[in-house]
Amino acid sequence: MESLVIIVFVLGYLAITLEHNLKIDKLIPALGMMAISWALISLGHLDVFEVNTEMLRLEPTHLDEILLHHLGKTSEILIFLIGAMTIVEIIDYFNGFSAIKDFVRTNSKVRLLWIFSILAFILSAIIDNLTATIVLITILRKIIQKKEDRLWFAGLIIIAANAGGAWSPIGDVTTTMLWIGKKVTTVNLIKYLFIPSLLCMVVPALIASRLPAFKGNIEPIEGAEDEKVDQYSKIMLYLGLSAIVFVPIFKTVTHLPPYVGMMLSLAVVAIFAEIYSNARISFTSVDVDSEAAGHYSPVHKALSGIELPSILFFLGILMAVAALESLGILFNFANEMNAAVPMLGTEPAIDGYNVSDTVVMLMGVASAVIDNVPLVAASIGMFSDPVDSPLWHFIAFAAGTGGSMLIIGSAAGVVAMGMEKINFFWYLKKISWLALIGFLVGSAAFILLRSFI
């Protein structure tokens, strides 16, 4: 019966990877393999286990207990993401992101490259790499007319956004998973990964700035009209970003789960959003009942705009991986893989248990082909290293930045592909080698930095 669970997971994973070929949204196989996996465990009366991280061994438990345990852990991540997505949608409701265009005041391609790369690196660390990519490509369309030029800029934005998301606990779903799962802490994540992530962005941008594609100036778009930006736009931009940044501080001070801080931040942002929204509306003598008033609520609008399919996908994939973890499959596989792969630059953990840097880098390369969310979810079930072990930081970096090597390897890449109709092979030829260099330089920097921390 365990073999059937593995087969279901592999088939579901394959369907997720081939989403564009099958033309089936990836949330469908994710939810399907989750439900079928747990059903097989229940019907087969399979033994389930919980990993004892202190003793590095599997301990038997009951199905109801382990299922509730994993659902609780998964729900923490989903509620956190819903809060973050809602705040971002509220900012967008007030056209807050349009205020970012004020930072762009040049026609030089090289200067624009650095401006967008730095903005992507910083924004992705605050509002996540996916949202940062959407915001910056939207701005890119209002500045650069020639499609070929936009494609190059979009490629470098993907690299910078994924690099920026890797060093922040709220910058990428995978780092958020590790953070909420108590594998990394905010301070140490930044300490270990800021420099490698910065190099992962800077080195490709530096090389690209010397390529012919970034020589000269852009052709300004004539007649382009800016979106309406008023005083509330900038206020909500800064308030929303500050509220998201506040969450790690709240967790550090209160020691409560991150989703609690995110809900507090959402409540504060929502209060100001309602106040500013009412201030912008000029009411006439026409009565506005409660139902009609709801139409003007930025909170209601924001909640209807969040990516619910993504939330359901994360639910499915995380609970499906949890099924494999509960059977002890991931834990045993980790030990076997660790023994089989050559130990190059290993970092000792508990009782001499090592995990090869080679394994982690292979995970980074794999994340360019398959979704990095299940990869990281699997690693959490496979390895039992303590909190803030260098292993977890390296996994966060590799999974976050390795996806840049292919256009389909990250959420940022997929959304850019859809927005600008980027060809898979064009990206492979023009951008992938830059992403690979950034990944290797960042990995080398991490391994070197780890020796001194």
Image: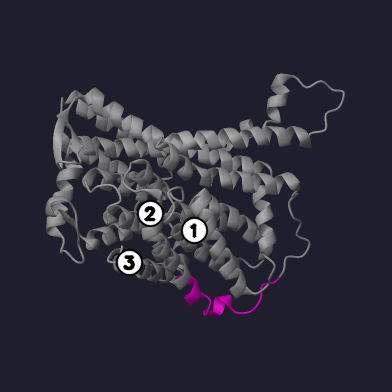
Q: Earlier in the sequence, mark 2 or mark 3?
A: 2
User: The magenta stretch spans which residues?
Assistant: 204-219
Residue 281: quarter of image: top right
Q: Which residue corresponds to the image point at 67% horizontal and 31% vertical from the top-left?
A: 297
Residue 12: image x %, image y %?
Answer: 31, 41
Direction front: furthest residue: 253
Q: Which residue is mark 1?
A: 161
Q: Which residue is mark 2?
A: 189
Say few, some or many: other residues with alpha carbon within 10 Å of mark 3 (under 14 / 14 to 19 / 20 or more): some
Residue 41: quarter of image: top left
Q: Which residue corresponds to the image point at 44% horizontal and 52% vertical from the top-left?
A: 168
Instruction: Give me the C-alpha separation between circle 1 and circle 2.
Output: 17 Å
Camera-side mark, 1 or 3: 3
Residue 315 tag number: none
Label 2: element kind = helix
* Residue type indicated by callout 2: Leu
Q: Which residue is mark 3?
A: 449
Q: Earlier in the sequence, mark 1 or mark 2?
A: 1
Q: Name above or below for residue 327 compared with residue 216.
A: above
Image quadrant where one finds the N terminus = top left
Residue 451 visible somewhere in the drawing = yes
Residue 95 visible somewhere in the drawing = no
* Residue type indicated by callout 1: Ala
For residue 169, side relative to residue 225 (left or right): left
Q: Name above or below for residue 332 compared with residue 364.
A: above
Q: Which residue corresponds to the image point at 32% horizontal and 61% vertical from the top-left?
A: 365
Direction right: furthest residue: 285
Label 3: element kind = helix
Residue 190: image x %, image y %?
Answer: 41, 56
